[in-house]
Image (cartoon, rainbow, N blue to C red):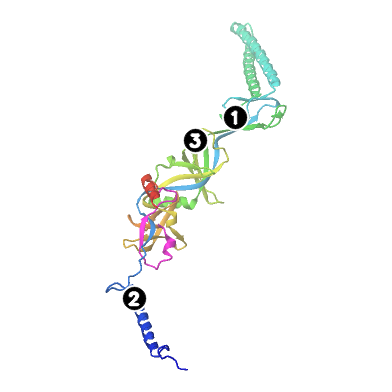
């Protein structure tokens, strides 16, 4: 059977189709390659990262008061133990426990009957002695002209004068006995020796008191003002004195007028300001501490004797000192260091000398100059960068402080309106 030659494909057509496919693939490759280039330019580089922002503060020297915080304890300025000085049965309590009493106010009444009887007996004895004195004096007056006329012997006159003097002594003794009896009668009414606040009664009605010893009845304490006793290390005291002598520190006013502030147990500061009274002249051999005492007003009675608290006292002032947030200072056994940001934005370590801390800030005495920028925040960001990488210093704000944007209502509203 014969086939049509035109219906059968020719083998010479396959090379032509393969060439067309190769040309199309080459054109596509060149087109894709040209998409990544601009006319006559190299491929565009990726965006560069901006410098890392770190929070800094500017060193500003000035006179800084060195405030020391020490543990203290409240003590009443005056304490009086009320005791029974007369023996007898306690009949009545005349005060309210825990109230304020005045000096001389009656607090207890002891059975006064025995002492009233003794007082009456003493007065009777005084009257008898006065009668004997009157009789002896009259006899002397009768004998005086008689002895001049030799009507009686001189011995009788001398005896009469001696009897008069003895009667005078008996009168003086009787008067002393009356006074003693009145004092004992007064002891039957127990009064407060000082003004202050009285505690609980130590005895009750019906108790026998003062028998053989002065029985304690109550305690009165004057708590306005109060004393606050606190201690300081003897080494700190000597170091402070040497710094003052060298001129590094200057005294914050006179030692007698140094102000004292109290910090309560909950961290709040007591409203009234006290004054330093004295510093003890001896050092406790067991603790190595020096005792100080301050006087603090207590008009509302908020400070109770025995209360533990913290005492803040400004003993000296440092000249040309710089204060830094505590988190800006790294403290190690080798010394204290800070991170200083230079004009080129590079961070370098600096060794400083720290004196004390106050209000969560360190007082720096040496190692910094005015105007230098000290890094406070952003230390974790630097750990991810190579050493010597420049940073961008921005003003540091303490936690809780309002930001500049939050302080402007219009700025906050504008930022909130943006998508």
Q: Position of residue 177 (x, y in %)?
A: 65, 20
Q: Which of the numbered marks, if any, corresponds to residue 297?
A: 3
Q: Which residues are magenta?
A: 376-403
Q: Is residue 134 magenta?
A: no
Structural distance between the alpha carbons of marks 2 and 3: 92 Å
**Label 2 with label 3: CB-CB less than 8 Å:** no
Q: Say which element carries label 3.
A: loop
Numbered mark located on residue 20 in the image: none
Instruction: Let me know if residue 403 appears in the view.
Output: no
SS at circle 2: helix
Q: Which badge, 1 or 3, comes first in the chain's sequence? A: 1
Tell me what residue is drawn at x 53 percent, y 51 percent: 288
Q: Is residue 348 among what the camera can see?
A: yes
Between 270 and 20, the one lying in front of the other is 20
| Residue 31 marker | 2
Point out residue 53 in the picture as x, y percentages from the top left corner.
38, 59
In the image, residue 365 above or below residue 15: above
Above or below, comparing residue 111 to residue 133 in the picture: below
Please state the horizontal and vertical placement of residue 174, each as a whole percent of the image.
Answer: 65, 18
Residue found at the very far front of the displayed protein: 1
Q: Is residue 261 left or right of residue 105?
A: left
Please identify the quarter of the rendering in which residue 121 is found.
top right
Q: Residue at x 40, y 89 (%)?
A: 6
Asked if the residue under mark 3 is in contact with the one under mark 1, i.e. CB atoms within 8 Å, the reply is: no
Q: Which mark is residue 99?
A: 1
Q: CA distance from mark 1 to mark 3?
A: 19 Å
């Amino acid at each position: 059977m014969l086939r049509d030659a035109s219906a059968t494909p020719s083998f010479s057509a396959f090379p032509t189709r393969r060439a067309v496919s190769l040309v199309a693939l080459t054109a596509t490759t060149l087109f894709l390659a040209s998409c990544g280039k601009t006319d006559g330019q190299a491929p565009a580089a990726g965006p560069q990262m901006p410098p890392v922002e770190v929070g800094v503060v500017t060193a500003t020297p000035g006179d800084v008061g060195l405030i020391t915080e020490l543990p203290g304890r409240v003590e009443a300025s005056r304490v009086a133990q009320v005791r029974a000085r007369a023996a007898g049965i306690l009949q009545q309590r005349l005060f309210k426990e825990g109230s304020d009493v005045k000096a001389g106010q009656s607090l207890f009444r002891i059975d006064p009957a025995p002492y009233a009887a003794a007082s009456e007996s003493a007065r009777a004895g005084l009257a008898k002695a006065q009668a004997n004195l009157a009789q002896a004096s009259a006899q002397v007056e009768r004998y005086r002209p008689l002895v001049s006329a030799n009507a009686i012997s001189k011995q009788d006159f001398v005896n009469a004068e001696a009897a008069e003097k003895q009667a005078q002594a008996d009168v003086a003794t009787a008067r002393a006995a009356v006074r003693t009896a009145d004092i004992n009668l007064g002891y039957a009414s127990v009064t407060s020796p000082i003004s202050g606040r009285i505690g609980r009664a130590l005895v009750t009605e019906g108790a026998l008191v003062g028998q053989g010893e002065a029985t304690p009845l109550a305690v009165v304490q004057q708590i306005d003002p109060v004393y606050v006793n606190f201690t300081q290390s003897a080494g700190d005291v000597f170091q402070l004195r040497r710094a003052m002598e060298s001129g590094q520190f200057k005294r914050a006013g006179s030692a007698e007028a140094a102000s004292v502030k109290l910090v309560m147990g909950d961290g709040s500061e007591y409203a009234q300001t006290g004054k330093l009274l004295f510093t003890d002249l001896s050092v406790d051999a067991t603790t190595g501490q020096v005792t100080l005492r301050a006087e603090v007003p207590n008009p509302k009675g908020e400070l109770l004797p025995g209360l533990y608290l913290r005492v803040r006292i400004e003993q000296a002032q440092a000249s040309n000192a710089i204060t830094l947030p505590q988190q800006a200072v790294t403290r190690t056994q080798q010394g204290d260091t800070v991170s200083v940001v230079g004009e080129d934005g590079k961070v370098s370590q600096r060794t400083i000398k720290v004196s004390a801390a106050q209000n969560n800030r360190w007082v720096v005495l040496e190692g910094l100059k005015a105007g230098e920028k000290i890094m406070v925040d952003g230390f974790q960001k630097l750990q991810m960068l190579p050493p010597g990488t420049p940073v961008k210093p921005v003003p540091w704000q303490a936690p809780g402080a309002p930001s500049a944007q939050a302080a402007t209502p219009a700025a906050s509203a504008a930022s909130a309106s943006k998508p």
